[in-house]
Amino acid sequence: MSIPATDRVASALSLLREGKATEAETLLQEEIAANPTSGTAFQYLGIARTQRGDTNGGIAALQEAARLLPGNAGVAYNLGAALMQENRLSEAPTARSSAVTL
């Protein structure tokens, strides 16, 4: 039985809070396939990938979230944190300062 699109992101967020990043990523990929303009799904996909150790994949998802949700402080903060984790320090201050400004 599949989860309705409206519940996938909420279910994925619950899984992330439980430390189940791989399961959350599966739901988020389903949501993105159904709704490719869901900035929220891309944001949580970035967090899930980063949590499971795929920081570069997380950065890519968070960059897409930033494109879809311009001005979102949470996206900017998480993108900046992921960039710092990958030692992409020249890019991180721009993302993190956007979060503070917002």
Image: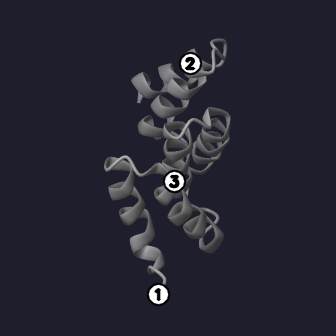
CB contact under 8 Å: marks 3 and 1: no
Hey, what amino acid is under mark 2? Met
Q: Decide: marks 2, 3 in contact (CB < 8 A)?
A: no
**Residue 1: x %, y % from top left:** 47, 87
x 51%, y 65%: residue: 27
Residue at horizontal 56 percent and vertical 21 percent from the top:
85
Q: Which element type, helix, strand or loop, lies under badge 2?
A: helix
| Three-letter amino acid code of the residue under disc 1 | Met
User: What is the C-alpha distance between the residues marked 2 and 3?
Assistant: 22 Å
The residue at 65%/46% (across/down) is 64
Q: Residues within 10 Å of mark 2 (few under 14, many from 20)?
A: some
Q: Which mark is residue 1?
A: 1
The residues bearing labels 3 and 1 have C-alpha atoms spaced at a distance of 19 Å
Element type at mark 1 = loop
Q: Quadrant of residue 35?
A: bottom right
**Residue 70 on image: x %, y %:** 55, 43
Q: Earlier in the sequence, mark 2 or mark 1?
A: 1
Residue furthest bottom in the image = 1
**Which amino acid, mark 3?**
Thr
Between 43 and 66, the residue placed more toward the observer is: 43
**Mark drawn on residue 84:** 2
Mark nearer the viewer, 2 or 1: 1
The residue indicated by pointer 3 is 22
- CA neighbours of label 1 inside 10 A, class few (<14), some (14 to 19), many (20+): few
**Which of the two discs, 2 and 3, labels the residue nearer the N terminus?**
3
Q: Is residue 62 left or right of residue 21?
A: right
In the image, residue 46 above or below residue 99: below
